[in-house]
Image: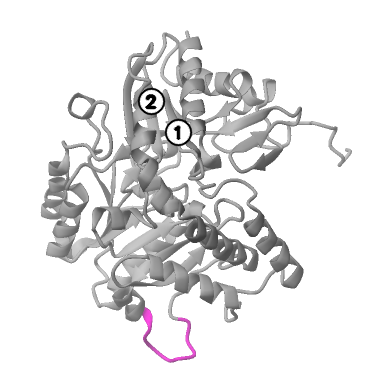
Amino acid sequence: MSTVAAPNDLNAYWMPFTANRSFKRAPRMLSKAKDMHYWTPEGRKLLDGAAGLWCVNAGHSRDPIVKAIQDQAAEMDFSPPFQFGNPKAFQLATRVAAMAPGDLDHVFFANSGSEAVDTALKMAIGYFHMQGQGQRQRLIGRARGYHGVGFGGISVGGISPNRKIYGAMLAGVDHLPATYNRAEQAFARGEPDWGAHLADDLENIVALHDASNIAAVIVEPMAGSTGVIAAPKGYLQKLRAICDKYGILLIFDEVITGFGRLGYAFAAERYGVVPDMICFAKGITSGTVPMGGVVVRKCIYDAFMKGPDHAVEMFHGYTYSAHPLACAAGLATLDVYEKEGLFERARKIEPIWADAVHSLKGLPNVADIRTIGIVGAIDLAPNNVGPGKRGFEAMDEAYHKQDLLFRIAGDTIVLSPPLIISEAQIDEVVEKTAKVIKALG
């Protein structure tokens, strides 16, 4: 059997979260990227309305980030993260900790949002073990939540297709209700007024299991992958108060919302809520090199720093934790964010973005629109083939006919462009999305 693949052979690659058979009949290929655009192999230029996959916040192939990666690769390609360190890992951890609120002072590096979430869940359970409260093992997520694809993440996650064929998952997990109600929140800009009371369901879970058995609650400040569901006004503050009342750790999954997507380094700052841990990934390197991590409060770090000095305090980590190329990319990316004021810029253009996306109201089959930060979601009514088909057709139409790239979540169009987007490009994204919606059956 030949080991040389035929040119353009698409068979070997099993693609993630993709309709593989459909894709391979009519591929949507990307071969080059710069600033706000992708290019296809044939040379068509596509406007990126999705920041790649929520991650390219600084824009594509930015020269300072590219140079930092190239220089690091030439200087040192890899260093072992167990028992050895590289200087840039400590520099990046210091900068991320300085950006986090309150006393979230310590950073543990992973390679993705999924790994960051599983790390945080292990830290939560381990923290209580170190405190002599080893019975605190229960974890609480939320319906429609997305926390990556590790077994911990899908256990606390609440998107059915991500869970249903994978067996029992982690034991001892409960879920808060989702915070979306179209009848009460339709066409919301920013945080909806209705829904803070849904945090009170945490009291019911505590009453059922007793707080002495619960380790942590994990939520996204904005549930992105399910279709952009912003936390209602006062909701996160209520969760924080209930967690404080019962000594439960509160984890914010900011893999999407971190690094400017909602106008701040972390959404925790936007809401004035200090969680006990923040999971991050995506925007830390603007998508250039895989990296994720967890920022934790000082008390959590200190709880593990016991025993003999020569002994490993936490038996957890990854071969590529704090990879030198990722650290170099992260430092350069944070420099770009700071020098160009991209977080502040996101806050400034949020109302302009919201006005533009909400102008799509009234188009055929548009059932709801939600905006927050530099994110927008347009819910489309399902067609007669069934849920998800109209959304798939919208993505396909955008790529092939409108030279636009965006994400879909079922029948929801999701827009989350790089934070460098101009006002003219905002108009272009919305105009092309309108043409896509009008073209659908």
Image point 51% across, 37% down: which residue? 50
Spatial separation of the CA atoms under disc 1 and disc 2: 8 Å
Give percent across and percent down for residue 253: 37, 53
Q: On residue 98, which mark appears?
A: none
Bounds of the magenta segment: 304-312
Label 2: which residue? Answer: 378
Give percent across and percent down for residue 344: 39, 52
Would residue 332 appear left or right of 270 to someone viewing this image? Answer: right
Could you tell me if the residues under marks 1 and 2 are in contact, i.e. CB atoms within 8 Å? yes
Image point 17% across, 37% down: which residue? 193
Front residue of 4/393: it is 393
Location of residue 331 (image quadrant): bottom right
Q: What is the three-letter code of the residue carrying label 1?
A: Leu
Image point 46% across, 62% down: which residue? 293
Q: What is the three-letter code of the residue carrying label 2?
A: Ile
The answer, for residue 356, to whether it is visible in the render is yes
Residue 102's place in the image compared with 180, above or below, is below
Tell whether position 195 is magenta.
no
Counting residues from the start of the chain, the first of labels 1 and 2 encountered is: 2
The answer, for residue 147, to whether it is visible in the render is no
SS class, disc 1: strand
Image point 42% across, 53% down: which residue? 343
Give percent across and percent down for residue 97: 40, 70
Report the predominant secondary structure element of the magenta stretch: loop
Label 1: which residue? Answer: 415
Front residue of 280/134: it is 280
